[in-house]
Image (cartoon, helix red, strand yellow):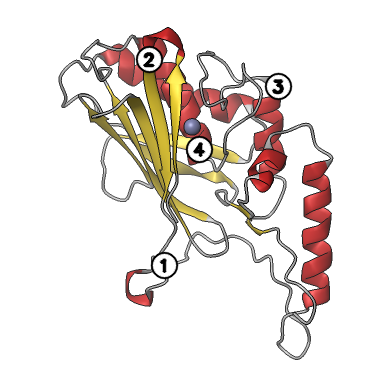
Amino acid sequence: MRRSTALLLGLAAVAATYLLVRQGGDAGSRPAERQVARETVIVGQAGTVDWDSVRATRAAVRRRIAESDTYLPLMLAEGDSLLRRWPDRVDRPITVYLPEGGVTGYTVAMGQAVENAFSRWQRGSWIPVQFQIVRDSAGAEVMVRWIDRFPNRRTGQADLRWNRRGWILDGTLTLATHSQNGWQLSEDAVYTVALHEIGHLLGLGHSDVSGDVMYPTTSVHDLTLRDRRTAGLLYALPAGSVTDPGPGR
Ligand SMILES: [Zn+2]
């Protein structure tokens, strides 16, 4: 599965997008599931799946989402029925490789803006996830990549991989130092783009309320209560499908 959504940042016309790349079904290329923290499927005594329990659990999850003041219902309404998120990572932070420069237009302030954006999510979003910035790419779970510019109006992009149960395995954030027309991005713009893309990295989709960081055309500089509530709900639920397996399953 592959998804692309553009983010436009106000009049500056800087834009970001995210691509979600589902783990393929080819066993040869399937990453190890070492980061899977929880199972959502309940197995009965005979070793078979207890579908009644699965149905009841998923119905309860759907109800909780529907009754929430978050933008998770929008995600379900758009036909995306798989909740994707990282396993709880408080004790073992997610490692983020953040290279210092290597591209035209990079400034130390841009790097700091990205670090601040990660910090903002982990401080203010009520989720059981911590990040650790590392300077060695080997083994890092999130790779930040700086580029001069995208060939379109984007200024950022998040790519994710997850396993079939919806647990996120790793991701890449690609951030530009210039807009498509060559304007150098301010550190404020880089911060806003990073904040939005980290939201996708955490498994969030888009908000339908302008003013939220996860609104597709956001230009806001801080998480709203709704951003925080949506992330909080996502991380209070298990990853995985929320669709009814149907009768007979
Ligand atoms: Zn987006």
Q: Mark 2 points at which residue?
A: 13
The residue under label 1 is: 32
Closer to the eye: label 1 or 2: 2
Farthest residue to the bottom: give it. 46
Question: Does the beta carbon of the residue at mark 4 sit less than 8 Å from ligand 1?
Answer: yes
Residue on which disc 4 sits = 200
Dot placed on the residue nearer the N-terminal end, 3 or 2: 2
Q: Which residue is drawn at 31% across and 51% down?
A: 139
Comes first in the chain, label 1 or label 4: 1
- Residue type beneath disc 2: Ala
What residue appears at the point 42 percent right and 17 percent down from the top-left corner? 191
Residue 92, given in percent of the width and then of the height, sits at 51, 46
Report x, y in % for residue 178. Answer: 25, 17
Element carrying mark 3: helix
Q: Earlier in the sequence, mark 4 or mark 3?
A: 4
Residue flagged by tag 3: what amino acid is it? Leu
Q: Which amino acid does label 1 sit on?
A: Ala
Q: In this view, does 121 lie to the left or right of 181?
A: right
Q: Which of pointers 2 and 4 indicates the residue nearer the eye?
A: 2
Is disc 3 surrounded by few (<14), some (14 to 19) or many (20+) residues within 10 Å?
Answer: some
| Residue under the image location 63 percent in, 45 percent down | 78
Q: Nearer the viewer, residue 21 or 161?
A: 21
Q: Mark 3 or mark 1, which has the lower sequence index?
A: 1
Q: Mark 2 or mark 1, which is nearer the start of the sequence?
A: 2
In the figure, 202 relative to 47: above or below?
Answer: above
- Residue 201: image x %, image y %? 48, 40
* Between marks 3 and 1 in the image, the one whose residue lies nearer the viewer: 3
Picture quarter containing residue 72?
top right
| Distance CA(mark 2)–CA(mark 4) | 20 Å
